[in-house]
């Protein structure tokens, strides 16, 4: 499963509003993860990577509760991660690990694993989206879901490869193992779809529906563009540049906007200068005046 880093938050005071907010997100997010697995993923024996995915495989072999298996895997992984990587995994991560397992086994005990829909595509997409939403809320609260995230970090450090590559290797191994155990290669595409849905949903939650964008604009009418940005109550910076061909001096505007504002600015720039150059960049966070306060 893809890597999701803990987000930085101001120091929490015990029982403060921020403390209640973050721990409520962890509880609700863990419940959503369990609901996604119980009602959409596990009934069809889909394996979307991660420790819970591997636990679904072991459940098929030893008939032991999925959540309990996951917890038995996560506890030594957490200890191993602390030993190799240091104390990067706090009480919130431990709580998220425990709650995820407890909720999965509790729902299984109360309701079993009912098939909500027989359509594998719908199950993989809805299950992945619900799990991704849950993981996103947990990460937003400053925790991680642990599991293969710890393995990937350790192997990445040992073998000097990127975390992204390690996640592909680990999740690929888990999906391949599921094909061998369940002896159904037709499940593989749906497992991959579930993994992609989890990843995309987590990204959407972490970036927010009102995602921030950065823009680099080169235009001879930079003063008019500057005034338009200021009218939108946004700021920016002039960067000095030089054309590659004619070596003429250029003023480059760098600014940060939300998605709606960027669309308005692009329309304005194209209207006054069809020859303008605009490059837009996705940003995970923007701090400073008009955006998040610097912590």
Image (cartoon, rainbow, N blue to C red):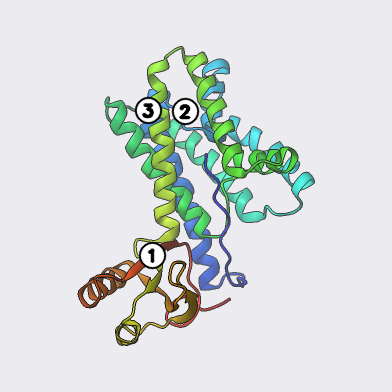
Q: Residue at x 47, y 62 (%)?
A: 284
Q: From the viewer's perspective, is 280 left or right of 261?
A: right
**Relative to residue 15, is residue 83 drawn left or right?**
right
Q: CA distance from mark 1 to mark 2?
A: 39 Å
Furthest residue in direction left, as rendered: 271
Q: Position of residue 30 (x, y in %)?
A: 48, 47
Which sits earlier in the primary sequence, circle 2 or circle 3? 2
Q: Secondary structure at mark 3?
A: helix
The residue that label 1 is drawn on is 279
Question: Considering only vertical position in the picture, is 188 above or below 78?
Answer: above
Disc 3/disc 1 C-alpha distance (Å): 36 Å
**Residue 144 appears in the figure:** yes
| Residue at position x 35%, y 67% in the image | 278
Q: Position of residue 26 (x, y in %)?
A: 51, 54
Query: Could you say which disc has been placed on residue 295 in the image?
Result: none
Quadrant in the picture for the C terminus: bottom right
Determine if residue 133 is in view.
no
Label placed on residue 47: 2
Frontmost of labels 3 and 1 is: 1
Q: Is residue 44 above or below residue 284?
A: above
94 or 50, nearer to the observer: 50
Quadrant position of residue 218: bottom left
Q: Residue furthest right?
A: 83
Q: Tell me, yes or no, whether the two marked residues, 3 and 1, touch with CB atoms within 8 Å.
A: no
- Which residue is drawn at the image coordinates 60% and 70% (left, top)? 12
CB within 8 Å, label 2 to label 3:
no
Q: Quadrant of residue 97?
A: top right
| Residue at the image position 54 percent from the left and 35 percent from the top | 168
Which comes sooner in the sequence, label 3 or label 1? 3
């Amino acid at each position: 499963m893809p890597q999701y880093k803990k987000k930085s938050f101001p120091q929490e005071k015990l029982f403060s509003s921020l403390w209640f907010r973050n721990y409520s997100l962890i509880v609700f997010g863990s419940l959503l993860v369990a609901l996604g697995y119980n009602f959409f993923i596990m009934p069809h024996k889909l394996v979307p990577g991660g420790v819970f995915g591997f636990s679904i495989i072991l459940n098929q072999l030893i008939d032991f509760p999925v959540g309990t298996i996951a917890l038995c895997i996560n506890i030594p992984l957490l200890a191993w991660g602390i030993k190799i990587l240091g104390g990067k995994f706090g009480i919130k991560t431990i709580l998220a690990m425990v709650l995820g397992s407890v909720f999965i086994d509790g729902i299984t005990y109360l309701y079993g694993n009912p098939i909500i829909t027989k359509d594998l595509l719908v199950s993989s997409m809805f299950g992945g989206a619900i799990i991704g939403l849950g993981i996103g809320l947990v990460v937003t609260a400053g925790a991680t879901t642990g599991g293969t995230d710890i393995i990937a970090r350790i192997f990445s450090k040992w073998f000097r490869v990127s975390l992204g590559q390690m996640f592909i290797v680990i999740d690929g191994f888990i999906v391949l193992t599921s094909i061998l155990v369940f002896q159904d290669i037709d499940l593989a595409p749906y497992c991959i779809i579930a993994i992609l849905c989890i990843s995309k949903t987590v990204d959407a939650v972490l970036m927010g529906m009102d995602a921030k964008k950065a823009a680099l604009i080169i235009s001879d009418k930079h003063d008019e563009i500057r005034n338009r940005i200021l009218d939108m109550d946004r700021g920016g910076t002039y960067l000095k540049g030089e054309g590659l061909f004619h070596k003429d001096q250029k003023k480059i505007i760098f600014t940060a906007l939300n998605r709606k504002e960027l669309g308005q600015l692009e329309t304005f720039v194209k209207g006054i200068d069809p020859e303008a150059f605009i490059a837009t960049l996705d940003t995970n966070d923007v701090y400073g005046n008009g955006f998040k306060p610097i912590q």
